[in-house]
Image (tube, rainbow, N blue to C red):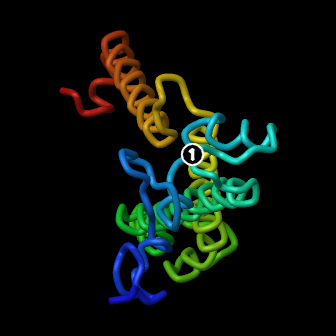
Amino acid sequence: MSQTPLLGRQGWFSMSDYIGTYEPGQTAASGGFAWYASMPAGVNDWLLPLLNQQTDMFGHSLTQIMLHVIFYVVLMTVGSMVFAKFWIDTTNMGTKDVAKQIERTGMQIPGFRKNPKVLEKILENYIPPVTYFSGAFVGLLAAGADLLGTVGNATGTGLLLAVGIILRTYEQIQKEQAMEMHPMLRQFFGAE
C-alpha cells in the first residue's frame, strides 16, 4: 500500500505541524503555534542567533526568530490588557461601580449634575484608558523580563508576583509599626 501525500507521519489531515511540534526528548515546542507562543529562554534563544546571523538550535530562520519574539511580546501585552479589563470588571472597579460608590459617599464633581450617569460618563474618559495602559505596561514588563532571562531563570510573571508580594508585606509591616507608634491610628484602622 503506497503512502499518499496527505498521509504523513501524524496521520490523515494532521494539524500538528501548525499547532505545535516537539523534537524527541525535548519539553519545549520546536515549531508551529506552540513555538511562536512559547517564552523565549533568554538572550541565548533569540538575541545571539540574530547577532551572529545564524539559525537557532531547531533550525529556524532569522525571520522566524524575529516573528517568534514579536508574537510573544504582542501575545503577552494583549493578554495582560484583557486580564486587566477582566480584573477591573470583576472587582467592582469599573466605571459604573466607581460612579455608584462616589454617589453613595455623597461626593460630586463641581459644575456637573449629581447623577451617576453623568459621573459614569466622566469616569469613562479615565478608567478604561488607565486600565489598558497599565495592563499593556505590565505585559511588556513581563515579556521583557522573559526575553532577557531573569536571574534564577524566573519568568517575568513570576518576578512581578514576587515583587508584588514583597511590597504588600512591606506595607503591612509599615502599617503595623505605625499603629504601635501612634495609638490613635489603631482606632482609625479598626484594630481595636
Q: Is residue 170 above or below residue 135?
A: above
Residue 180 as seen in the image, left or right of residue 149: left
Disc 1 is placed on an element classified as: loop
Residue 150: x %, y % from top left: 55, 29
Residue on which disc 1 sits:
40
Residue 146: x %, y % from top left: 56, 40
Residue furthest to the top in view is 181
Q: Is residue 39 above or below residue 95?
A: above
Residue 44 as seen in the image, left or right of residue 191: right
Residue furthest to the front in view is 1
Indicate the quadrant where residue 77 lies: bottom right
Q: What residue sits 38% from the left and 47% below the top? A: 27
Q: Pick whichever, 54 or 150, lies toward us.
A: 54
Indicate the quadrant where residue 125 lies: bottom right
Residue 184: x %, y % from top left: 33, 21
Residue 28 as seen in the image, left or right of residue 39: left
Asked whether residue 102 appears in the rendered view, the answer is no
Q: Is residue 140 above or below residue 177?
A: below
Q: Pick whichever, 56 or 124, lies toward us.
A: 56
Q: Pick whichever, 80 or 165, lies toward us.
A: 80
Residue furthest to the left in view is 192
